């Protein structure tokens, strides 16, 4: 039916389209790092900021006050997790340490790990954390309680109309023996 | 052929009648209770009018043609098949209309996103299937409770008559003062939920592991009801949201009461 | 929907292929395969329709009567999946199989054997979907959009669904490769691209969209699968992933997908309207450009499904503007159809009625689409019955009505027999009435605050839900009439002339006898 000339052209076309299909499949996966990069640049989900050294002093904006709220969540593990203070008022540029507390209410040893999230979502561009417990494995024995510090500074570059921000953590259970979540 | 156009006409007018049933009834967006909800309400009405005018215009022409340019009336077909001028006009005009629609919407979008300078912050956490609330900051700081559907099971199973607020009532309402900017922080414990109160004009997904925020300022005291708006499993239809807006003095009383009674100690459920 | 071939081409030289069931299993003939696609999609349409009636029966009154919430969620999920992937998409592929070679003067599809595989892959996929109801834990229940983490929670039903989607995706990709190659390489001499019938143009563009986005869907479901079973955390916050990323990738596929389901309908309608207006299509080249720009724009608007997921204002504004822009080429199409009808010499046989019905109702769906594109308004209506109303106006009275128009239009060519015009018209008017009864009220339900995907609701929504359910049952029953009309036509319709529509101008009417012979255009026609 189809003459051989045509067949050759058809097969060539099919090959091209198959390659294209493959590219699009890979593209689907490429969207993952792309999305992460995009979120990092625009600060949409603010997973983690690389830590900076404390000497990185910024000037303190004495004129301005920012309310920082602290929030804690757990997901799927028998822990009590809370900040020791719910909110504080600081000047941009001023470094501060707050404590969070975790308690294992169960009768077994549980491994957990926290990930952070912020509001407004671009906060991480203006938030420098010197010390933080997120993305590190926490092992709590039965009924053990631990306090963990978070030391950070809100940079004076924070847009002028923002006067309340939230720093939130969620603890997830790590299955026994799982390596830490990396970002 | 006569009878066919009669049928068409009858059909169209039936449709028009049927749609007019909704006008002015409870079947519109609910009465707005915040600035944002008001903006949304007004823009929606304006858009409906624009759409209606275009609709009548386009289908007026089409139905005129359907009635007149019929083979059965002996109408002879013309043979034109394009006109660059006309085509440019009907590309440009819709663009202009769209710009007119986008302008007010853009302003509202920016206003909706402005969660700065709140008077108080409340965190809402979605659980399968209820909401948890924590007053994070502002008057009432430290208050924390769960809010579950309070409609008796018997009503759902048709074993008891259904009340007025069937499926839209909870054991513990979120209480906020009137006229204060309330920022809502959202997260979820298990799967995605969405916090929606139509009269206040807010809907925001609650995403496990992340926080999102939104805000409202209620204009009037009252009780405003909404529902979870993101499929979250079996009882997705059974996790309403009820916000009670109080005068400032009433609100302070409520806060004092909460302080006296036992407050949820931990900030999460065990599962 | 189309001929059982036995009597339709008895006089043809079909002696050299197997008969009985083996004929259908081994066939590489585009007409046989087209026929199978159409019957398959109709069967799926009835299956999905039955699920919809289950949903509507539950929603007939407040309270839980028939479907427990778990089962209700399985019904909505499978209704959506089956209608989208089992009914609408294969139906269009069936039309492409039958019509593309006939309209471009090619003897068959470019890859006849692959064509056979693309069809037969559908059967295991459909079986997986339907049988998942009988698994312990039931079918997938996370919505046809299967957002994680909800879909990570589900049981074996979700794995069946993932597997089915993989197979369906492979089938679609093979089908599209075939269609693109056929159109680009096998046109009759003289048929330049800008002389191709609109239906062929719309399918060419659709097929490109398919190879563009189906692999992305395959990637998404693969990630979901490995998240569920192999410890990856693409969409799991606990492992450093993000559930919202799933939505982005899904809708990167999902929005072009809705245009995949509507562009070929534009093509069908653009064939039918000129034929029954006895006047050439107005603005052919602007139609082609409009179709192409819709396809391109459809790739950059996906996040309009996620306005409440939490996006920066710039993101919301970008996706709002891009989405509104799609209204422009869509409007151009509607104006072109109107101008085609203007000063034509129209007659109103069933295909024309369905096409006009299509334009009328599709425009309503288009308007509600623009309203949904306005971010502040969408914040209110997203995930409510308003959206349900919107997409049924574009999918049922859009895609489905166009499919009906096409079926009535081409059935004489396929079977050699005419359908019963009176019954066809009855089918149209009943569909029109019941469709609006079902879905128009859903706009009000959504505005008034009824979320979608809920099995039970407050009393204030009761009256319109009851109307909607009555309409749905009427609509469902009306489709049995369609089945009857088609079977009646195949069995005992009057003999059709070569060109039953005097205004038709495409090759299948001008160059081929009726019914179209089993092997057509073995020598290509010459197009001036
Ligand atoms: C007899 C005709 C039909 C009726 C009565 C009907 C009714 C419904 C109902 C009641 C829902 C569920 C609402 C909810 O989410 O709570 C729904 C969802 C849906 N329908 Fe239809 N439908 C029909 C035909 C179609 C067709 C032809 C399509 C073709 C594409 C379609 C596509 C969808 C989709 C994609 C959903 C969303 C499913 C989901 O969100 O999980 N429907 N329909
Ligand atoms: Cu929900
Ligand atoms: Cu879309």
Image (cartoon, helix red, strand yellow):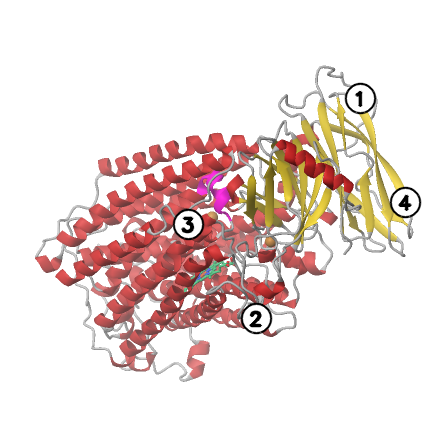
Q: What is the spatial separation of the Cα atoms under label 3 and label 2, in whole angstroms? A: 40 Å
Confirm whether circles 1 and 2 share one chain: no
Q: What is the spatial separation of the Cα atoms under label 2 and label 4, in whole angstroms? A: 49 Å
- Is disc 2 placed on a helix, strand or loop? helix
Q: Which residue was labeled with disc 3?
A: B27
Q: Earlier in the sequence, mark 1 or mark 4?
A: 1
Q: Which residue was labeled with disc 2?
A: C128
- In the image, taking residue A176 as reference, residue C481 lies left or right, namely left
Q: Which span of residues is magenta-colored?
A: C373-382
Residue C69, image quadrant: bottom right
Nearer to us in this view, C164 or C505:
C164
Confirm whether circles 3 and 4 share one chain: no
Indicate whether B23 appears above or below B97: below
Indicate whether A171 appears above or below C74: above
Q: Dot 4 falls on which chain?
A: A
What mark, if any, has residue A56 been given in the picture?
1
Q: What is the spatial separation of the Cα atoms under label 1 and label 4, in whole angstroms? A: 32 Å
């Amino acid at each position: 039916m189809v003459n051989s000339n045509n067949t050759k052209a058809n097969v060539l076309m099919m090959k091209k389209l198959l390659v294209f299909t493959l590219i699009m499949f890979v593209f689907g996966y490429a969207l993952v790092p792309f999305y992460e990069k995009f979120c990092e640049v625009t600060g949409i989900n603010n997973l983690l900021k690389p830590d900076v050294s404390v000497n990185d002093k910024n000037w303190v904006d004495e004129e301005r006050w920012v309310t920082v709220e602290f929030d804690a969540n757990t997901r799927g593990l028998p822990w009590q997790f809370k900040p020791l203070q719910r909110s504080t008022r600081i000047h941009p540029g001023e470094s501060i340490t707050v404590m969070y507390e975790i308690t294992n209410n169960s009768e077994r040893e549980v491994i957990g790990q926290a990930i952070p999230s912020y509001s407004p979502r671009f906060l991480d561009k203006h938030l420098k954390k010197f010390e933080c417990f997120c993305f590190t494995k926490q092992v709590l024995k039965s009924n053990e309680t631990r306090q963990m510090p978070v030391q950070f500074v809100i940079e004076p570059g924070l847009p002028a109309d923002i006067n309340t921000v939230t720093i939130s953590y969620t603890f997830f259970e790590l299955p026994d023996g799982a390596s830490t979540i990396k970002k | 052929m006569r009878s066919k156009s009669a049928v068409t006409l009858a059909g169209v007018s039936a449709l028009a009648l049927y749609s007019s049933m909704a006008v002015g009834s409870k079947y519109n967006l609910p009465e707005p209770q915040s600035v944002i909800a008001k903006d949304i309400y007004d823009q929606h009405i304006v858009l409906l009018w624009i759409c209606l005018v275009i609709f009548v215009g386009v289908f007026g022409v089409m139905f005129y043609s359907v009635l007149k340019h019929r083979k059965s009336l002996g109408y002879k077909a013309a043979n034109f098949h394009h006109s660059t001028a006309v085509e440019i006009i009907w590309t440009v005009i819709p663009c202009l209309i769209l710009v007119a629609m986008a302008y007010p919407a853009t302003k509202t979008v920016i206003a909706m996103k402005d969660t700065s300078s709140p008077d108080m912050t409340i965190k809402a956490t979605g659980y399968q299937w209820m909401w948890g609330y924590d007053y994070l900051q502002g008057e009432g700081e430290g208050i924390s409770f769960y809010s579950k559907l309070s409609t008796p099971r018997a009503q759902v199973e048709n074993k008891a008559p259904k009340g007025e607020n069937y499926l839209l009532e909870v054991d513990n309402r979120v209480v906020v003062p009137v006229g204060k900017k309330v920022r809502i922080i959202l997260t979820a414990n298990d799967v995605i939920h969405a916090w929606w109160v139509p009269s206040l004009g807010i809907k925001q997904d609650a995403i496990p592991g992340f926080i999102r925020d939104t805000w409202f300022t209620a204009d009037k005291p009252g009780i405003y009801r909404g529902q979870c708006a993101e499929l979250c499993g079996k009882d997705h239809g059974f996790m309403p949201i009820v916000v009670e807006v109080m005068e400032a003095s009433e609100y302070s009383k409520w806060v004092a009461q909460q302080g006296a009674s036992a407050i949820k100690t931990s900030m999460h459920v065990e599962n | 929907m189309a001929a059982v071939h036995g009597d339709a081409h008895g006089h043809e030289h079909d002696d050299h292929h197997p008969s009985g069931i083996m004929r259908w299993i081994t066939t590489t003939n585009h007409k046989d395969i087209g026929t199978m696609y159409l019957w398959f999609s109709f069967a799926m349409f009835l299956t999905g329709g039955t699920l919809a009636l289950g949903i509507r029966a539950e929603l007939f009154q407040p309270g839980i009567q028939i479907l427990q919430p778990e089962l209700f969620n399985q019904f909505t999920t499978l209704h959506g999946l089956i209608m989208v992937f089992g009914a609408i998409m294969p139906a269009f592929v069936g039309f492409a199989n039958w019509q593309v070679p006939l309209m471009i003067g090619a003897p068959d599809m470019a890859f006849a054997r692959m064509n056979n595989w693309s069809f037969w892959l559908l059967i295991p996929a459909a079986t997986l979907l339907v049988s998942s109801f009988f698994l312990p834990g039931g079918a997938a229940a996370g919505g046809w959009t299967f957002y994680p983490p909800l879909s990570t929670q589900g049981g074996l039903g979700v794995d069946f669904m993932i597997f089915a989607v993989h197979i369906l995706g492979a089938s679609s990709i093979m089908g599209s490769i075939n269609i693109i190659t056929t159109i680009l390489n096998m046109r009759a001499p003289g048929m330049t691209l800008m002389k191709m019938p609109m239906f062929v143009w719309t399918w060419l563009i659709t097929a490109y969209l398919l190879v563009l986005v189906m692999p992305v869907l395959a990637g998404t479901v693969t990630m979901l699968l490995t998240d569920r079973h192999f410890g990856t955390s693409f969409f799991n916050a606990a492992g450093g992933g993000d559930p919202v990323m799933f939505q982005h990738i899904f809708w990167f596929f999902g929005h072009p997908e809705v245009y995949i389901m509507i562009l070929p309908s534009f093509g069908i309608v653009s064939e039918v309207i000129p034929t029954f207006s006895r006047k050439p299509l107005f603005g052919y080249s602007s139609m082609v450009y409009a179709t192409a720009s819709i396809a391109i724009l459809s790739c950059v608007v996906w996040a309009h499904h996620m306005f409440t997921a939490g996006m920066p204002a710039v993101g919301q504004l970008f996706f709002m503007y891009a989405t509104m822009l799609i209204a422009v080429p869509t409007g151009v199409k509607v104006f072109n159809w109107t101008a085609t009808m203007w000063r034509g010499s129209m007659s109103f046989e069933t295909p024309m009625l369905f096409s006009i019905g299509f334009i009328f109702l599709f425009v309503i769906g288009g308007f509600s689409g623009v309203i949904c594109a306005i971010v502040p308004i969408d914040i209110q209506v997203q995930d409510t019955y308003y959206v349900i109303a919107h997409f049924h106006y574009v999918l049922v009275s859009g895609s489905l009505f166009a499919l009906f128009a096409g079926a009535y239009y081409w059935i004489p060519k396929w079977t050699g027999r005419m359908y019963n015009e009176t019954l066809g018209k009855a089918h149209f008017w009943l569909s029109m009435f019941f469709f609006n009864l079902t879905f128009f009220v859903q706009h009000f339900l959504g505005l008034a605050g009824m979320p979608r995907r809920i099995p039970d609701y407050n009393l204030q929504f009761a009256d319109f839900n009851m109307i909607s359910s009555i309409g749905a049952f009427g609509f469902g029953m009306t489709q049995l009439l369609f089945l009857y009309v088609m079977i009646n036509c195949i069995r005992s319709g009057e003999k059709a002339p070569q060109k039953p529509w005097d205004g038709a101008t495409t090759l299948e009417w001008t160059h081929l006898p009726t019914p179209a012979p089993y092997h057509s255009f073995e020598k290509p026609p010459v197009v001036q």
